[in-house]
Image (cartoon, rainbow, N blue to C red):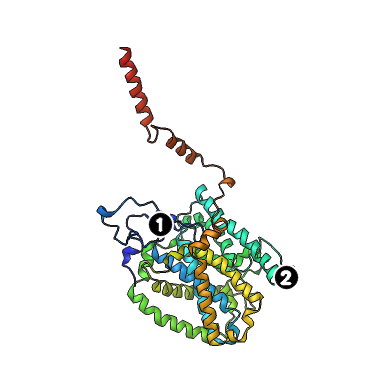
Amino acid sequence: MFHAASSLVPSSRSPQNQNDQHDQHDGRQDDHPDRAPGRSGSGRPEDRPAERTSPRPGAQRDAFFDNAKYLAIVLVALGHAWEPLKGDSRALQAAYMLVYTFHMPAFIVISGFFSRSFDGSPERLKRLITGVAVPYVVFETAYPVFRRYVDHLPTQDISLLDPWYLTWFLCALFIWRLTTPVWKLVRHPLPLALGVAMLASVTPAIGDDLDLQRVLQFLPFFVLGLCLEPRHFRLVRRRSVRIAAVPVFALALAFTWWAVPRMNGGWLYHRDSAQELGAPWWAGPVMQLALFGCSLLLTVCFFSWVPGRTMWFTALGAGTLYGYLLHGFLIKGADYRGVFDQPALHRPLGVVAVSLVVAVAVTLLCTPPVRRVFRFVMEPKMAWAFKPDAAELARERARRQPGRDQPGQGRTREAERRERVGVQER
C-alpha cells in the first residue's frame, strides 16, 4: 500500500521546487492533474531517459501529501458534524476527542513543511495575499452574513478581527507564514515556539483578536513542519511504525473514553488560556506540553497510515481549501435549520449516516468542478492589485525582441553587422 522511500520526493527535484509545488497550503494550487511522483501520466516510470519528455516544472505532486491533506480534511468535517451529536454518546465523545487531538496538528505540520521556501519575496507575498488573505476576508464576511439570513439573526456582527468558526486557520496561516524567516533564522526554533505557546496558555489578556490564542498555541506544530525534512516522513511510514500505530490508536481511544467525564474538552481547541478554562495558571504550560506530545504521537500514527501511492482521492488533495471553507456552510446550515435535533440522528445508525453524508459532501467540494466555480474567490489572480515586477518585465521585453533571448547574443549580431559593412566599404 505504500511506495518505497523514493516515492516521497522525486530525486530529480530539489526540496525548493517541492516546496513551491505545495507552497500555498490549501491556497493557490497547481492546475495540472495530480500524479504520483516518479510516474508519468501514462503510468510508466519517468526514470527512463528514453521515454521521458521535458516535463513542465512543478507538473508533479507528491501523492502522499495530497492523500494526507484529503484524509485530514475529511476528519475535520466529521469532527464538525459530530459536535452537535456527541452529547448523547460517550463513545462518540471519545472519538471526537481523539480526532481533535491530531487532525488539525497534522494539517498544520504539513502547512509548515511546505512553507519552508517562504522567504518574503514579492512573488510569495502575492501568493500569500491571494491564496490566504483574500479568502479569509471573503469567508469571514460570508459566514456571518449566512447566519444573519439562514439563522434569522440580524444582530450577527461582521468583524475581520474576530475569526468566526473555521476561518481562524487562514488567519493563523497568514501570520505563521509571515514569521517563517524568523523561525528559519533562530538556532532552536521548536523549543522557542513551545515556550511561546506555554506563555500564551497563561495569558488571558491576549483576548480574541485574530484568534491569537490559537495562533500561538498551535504555533509549535507549524514550526515543527518547518524543521522537518522528507527523510522524517519516510521514517514514520515504515512498516514497523504502521504496525505500532494500531495499539497506540486503540489505547488513545480507550484513554479518551475514560477522560470524557474527567477532562475539559476545551483544551483541545487551543483557543483559551488556563484561567479561562477554570484551571490554575500552572496547568496551562503542563497541558501544552502534554497535548503537544499526545498530538505529535497520534499525528505520526496518522501519517504512517496515509497511502503513499496514487489513490482515487489523491487528486482531491489539491482542493482541500475548497472543502475546508465550503463544508462549513453545509454543517452550519443544517444546524441552524434544526436538522441535528432529529432524534434519529442521535442513534448509532444516525451518526453513521451523518458521517457518510458529510464525508461524501466534503469529497465533492474538493472536486475540480467546484474548484472551477469558486476559483475566483479562492485563487484570484488580482494582477491589477500589484505593481509589476521590474525583473519580470525585463525578461518579457527580452523575449519579445529577436536576437536578445540570450545574454551577449545581441552584441554578437551587432558585431557581425559591422563586420559586413566594413567588408562592403573595402
The image quadrant where one finds the N terminus is bottom left
Circle 2: is it few (<14), some (14-19), or many (20+) Cα within 10 Å? few
Percent across and percent down for residue 378 are 55, 58
Mark linked to residue 256: none
Residue pushed farthest top? 426
Residue type highlighted by circle 1: Gln
| Residue 135 quadrant | bottom right
Percent across and percent down for residue 39 are 32, 60
Percent across and percent down for residue 286 are 54, 75
Pair 1/2: label in front: 2
Percent across and percent down for residue 51 are 27, 54
| CA distance for labels 1 and 2 | 46 Å
Residue occupying image coordinates x 37% and y 25%: 414
For disc 1, the marked residue is: 18
The image quadrant where one finds the C terminus is top left
Residue type highlighted by circle 2: Leu
| Residue 325 quadrant | bottom right
* Mark 1 residue element: helix
Circle 1: is it few (<14), some (14-19), or many (20+) Cα within 10 Å? some
N-term mark: 1 or 2: 1
Contact (Cβ within 8 Å) of mark 1 with mark 2: no
Q: Nearer the viewer, residue 206 or 419?
A: 419
For disc 2, the marked residue is: 153
Q: Does the image show residue 106? A: yes
In the image, residue 263 above or below residue 165: below
| Residue 387 quadrant | top right
Horizontal placement of 224 versus 170: left or right? left
In the image, residue 219 above or below residue 269: above
